[in-house]
Image (spheres, rainbow, N blue to C red):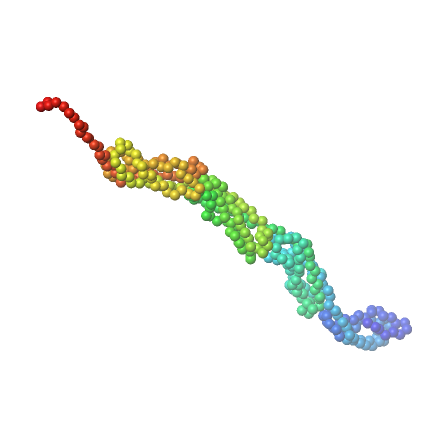
Amino acid sequence: PQVDALQTGDVVGTAPTQAYDTKNVGTGKTLTASGLVINDGNSGNNYHILYATNNTGVITVRDINVTAQHDDRIYNGTTSSSVAPQVDALQTGDLVGTAPTQAYDTKNVGTGKTLTASGLVINDGNSGNNYHIIYTTNTTGVITVRDINVTAKTDSRIYNGTTSSSVAPQVDALQTGDLIGTAPTQVYDTKHVGSNKTLTASGLVINDGNSGNNYHIIYTTNTTGVITVRDINVTAKTDSRVYNGTTSSSVVPQVDALQTGDLIGTAPAQVYDTKHVGSNKTLTASGLVINDGNSGNNYHIIYTTNTTGVISVRDINVTAQTDSRVYNG
């Protein structure tokens, strides 16, 4: 404050100061002086101090920087960042009411990503209006791919001529908002009968808004697969023929349909149980050979008899022959 000139020999012992009427930003603010001490050899009593106010004071807003910080995290399906932005020191007595947060510009995997801070609330007794918050971005953010496991599951089925498996592999949970576009499938390593067979998964397509590139898919095999033999029926068919001295039958047994790609190598035949005339005779099939790439071991052949066979009697002619002789009584 400005102090009038003192009388000769008197001096200012303590200089006066002045203060605003409030701490908050504004114009036309009142400034009030106080605290003058005069050394006049009479404890200042030679003077009557008149303090005059000034109502043209101005307090302007203070810039405060909120700077987003570097973050490097795994893809989680959101733009969130768990790193806290850096806030400049507040003035004495002011507090952070709500801490700021920061977020990536996109949720997708990549480098050089922009992190932007927001949300700072300052408790300064003036609804935060004493500060001008400057949010500064950070362009060094990184989001890395997320591993996702697709695990083949055990399957036990009957031989069907293919490596297919109807069991669905297990897929780890996707991040919020992401969906399975195409579900994975699994297959056996061979089509043939056996145990401890390897099942391998493939084909997962993820709709994540980034062509699936936010994920690194890890396919895990399963070595407990089982393919069991397929029953195939070879059924003797009825036959009715004339006795020919053998048990043969010219009728071909009926064979169940083979699986795709498999062929009959040797067709089965059937025979009667005896060569003799009769009805309700048993016909038995045998001899089927299957070409399945596994010496026929993918099949269990079940031969089914037929008990309606008939062998009928054979006509045989005995023909008298011409003769010419002398009477012999």
Q: Nearer the viewer, residue 204 or 271?
A: 271
Residue under the point 28% across and 35% down: 272
Image spot of residue 46 (x, y percent): 85, 76
In-image side of 238 versus 161 (left or right): left
Where, by quadrant of the figure, is residue 38 drawn? bottom right
Residue under the point 27% across and 39% down: 240
Q: Nearer the viewer, residue 259 or 302?
A: 259
Among all residues in the image, which is located at the extreme left? Answer: 329
Where, by quadrant of the figure, is residue 277 drawn? top left
Counting the numbered discs, the total is 0
Residue under the point 60% across and 57% down: 78
Which quarter shows the N terminus? bottom right
Q: Is residue 76 visible?
A: no
Which quarter shows the C terminus? top left
Image spot of residue 101 (x, y percent): 64, 60
Image spot of residue 179 (x, y percent): 54, 55
Image spot of residue 317 (x, y percent): 21, 32
In-image side of 299 versus 284 (left or right): right
Q: Nearer the viewer, residue 306 or 12?
A: 306
Where, by quadrant of the figure, is residue 257 drawn? top left
Among all residues in the image, which is located at the extreme right? Answer: 8
Q: Is residue 109 visible?
A: yes
Residue under the point 61% across and 55% down: 108
In-image side of 90 versus 255 (left or right): right
In the depicted structure, whether residue 244 falls above or below residue 116: above
